[in-house]
Amino acid sequence: MEIRPNGTQFFSQHVSTEDQNLLLEDIRARIPDAPLYTPTMPRTGKSMSVRMTNFGAAGWMSDAKGYRYQRAHPETGNPWPDIPQSILDIWTGLLPDAPLPDVCLCNYYPADAKMGLHQDRDEQDLTIPVLSISLGDTALFRLGQTTRGGKTQSFKLRSGDVMILQGTDRLAYHGIDRIYPGTSSLLKQGGRINLTLRKAL
Ligand code: MD3
Ligand code: FE
């Protein structure tokens, strides 16, 4: 359902528990090749509380030099693993007419992690939608306006929820205020995984 006109669409419980477990298997199979790394903030070099990895032709990176997409893992120097077909199928099921994504950013949130309000504008074509899949513990997501300081709306994102950001909301400020520990049994170690599919190149 559309939660904002010409913008965000929210698909509550779009991925079944069985499929969530299949996605998780595909993610776990790729982590040894592309270990989660701790991004740092541009300028300050302060560590983020979220750990990240990527699948696809390019991956999103942040370090003291800034935000960017790059073709190699920052620690191993290897190309990123391919995007699992199981994840691509969710994109093509909901966005049959959009170009295929070339980046799947995989964020892992421990119980105490959060992500400050930010815009996503490192992609070449900002008219192509972004699709997000939530797995594991529930998160409190905040969606604002295209300028910092505008009014914001908060939503809970649960395991299996899918969100599409497009149109006027593609450049909206957004972030994760908190994780609710113990709200999902999907990840034995707890925490939350968020996958975002994008065409960046
Ligand atoms: C709104 N991730 O990786 S997903 C990110 O839950 C990011 O890990 C959050 O923000 C997370 O950049 C939120 C929902 C989302 C993803 C991309 C967006 C919302 C967005 C791009 C534009 C506007
Ligand atoms: Fe974002």
Image (cartoon, rainbow, N blue to C red):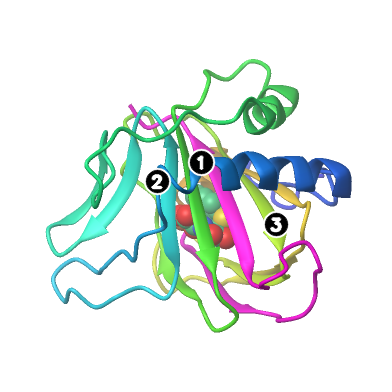
Q: Earlier in the sequence, mark 2 or mark 3?
A: 2
The answer to the question of whether label 2 and label 1 lie on touching residues, with beta carbons closer than 8 A, is yes
> In the picture shown, does residue 13 fall above or below 113?
above
Element type at mark 1: helix
- Give the residues in magenta: 173-201
Q: Position of residue 42 (x, y in %)?
A: 19, 66
Q: Nearer the viewer, residue 46 or 11?
A: 46
Q: Amino acid at mark 3?
A: Leu
Is residue 136 shown left or right of residue 105? right
Name the disc covering residue 34, or none: 2
Query: Which residue bears the numbered disc 1?
Result: 30
Position in image of residue 177 (x %, y %): 56, 78
- Estimate the spatial distance between the alpha carbons at disc 2 and disc 3, rounded to whole Å: 19 Å
User: Does residue 142 appear left or right of residue 119 in this picture?
Assistant: right
**Does the image show residue 52?**
yes
Q: CA distance from mark 1 to mark 3?
A: 16 Å
Instruction: Give the amino acid type for the residue marked by disc 1 in the picture.
Output: Arg
Position of the C terminus by quadrant: top left
Instruction: Please name the residue shown 37% across and 35% down the image.
Output: 80
Task: Using the rendered image of the protein, determine whether residue 146 is visible from the camera's viewpoint.
Answer: no
Q: Position of residue 155 (x, y in %)?
A: 71, 68
In the image, which is nearer the foreground, mark 1 or mark 3? 1
**Ligand 1 has an atom within 8 Å of the beta carbon of the residue at disc 2:** no
